[in-house]
Amino acid sequence: MHGGGGGGKKARIEVIPLIDIIFFLLATFIMVSLSMSKNTGMNVALPVAASAASLGDQQETEKAVTLSVNAQGEAFFNKEKVTLAQLPLKLQAYKSSTKKPKVIFNGDSKAPYGSVMAVVDEVRKIGITTIGMSAEKK
């Protein structure tokens, strides 16, 4: 007596489509993570300078903190909006957690000069001496 339907064939899991899906997910994950790591600062309209240079080694740039001041004079620590009272605490925590603290400064070309100088002054008060200024090449 044989059992019900069909009998002899066993169900198989096809491996090749599974491998295709895994490679697709891996490629997608890599592309998303690469696109996220570059953009650490706020989008501001950078001033144009003839002497603007690239920021150097990618690994060195990743360890740096990006400070931004937008056209309204608001300050940002990476992408997080901060007040001038909160900025020294964040900078001090960053300085204590990093051997060579570096700050990359993004200032909007229409930002109030007083706001820009207040942020740069806070960086200098903490004792961080390596400050890069972002600009677009002419």
Image (cartoon, rainbow, N blue to C red):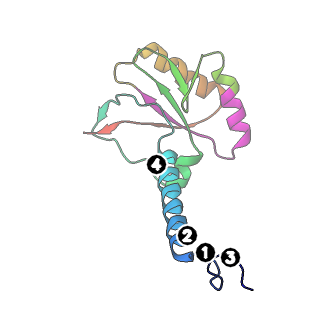
At 70% from the left edge and 25% from the top edge, which residue is drawn?
89
**Residue 69 picture location, percent across and down:** 46, 23
The quadrant in which residue 65 appears is: top right
Report the amino acid beneath label 1: Ile
What amino acid is at disc 3?
Answer: Gly
Q: Going 55% across and 51% down the picture, which residue do you hit?
A: 60
Q: Which residues are magenta?
A: 90-107
Residue indicated by mark 4: 35
The picture places residue 38, in percent across and down from the top left corner, at: 47, 46
Q: Which of the marked residues, 1 or 4, is nearer the chain's N terminus?
A: 1
Q: Is residue 109 above or below residue 103?
A: above
1 and 4 marks in contact (CB < 8 Å): no
Q: Which residue is mark 3?
A: 4
Q: Earlier in the sequence, mark 2 or mark 3?
A: 3
Among the two numbered marks 2 and 4 on one chain, the one whose residue lies closer to the N terminus: 2
**Badges 2 and 1: C-beta atoms under 8 Å apart?**
yes
Discs 2/1, front: 1
Give the amino acid at mark 4: Ser
Q: Is residue 119 left or right of residue 100?
A: left
Q: Nearer the viewer, residue 74 or 6?
A: 6
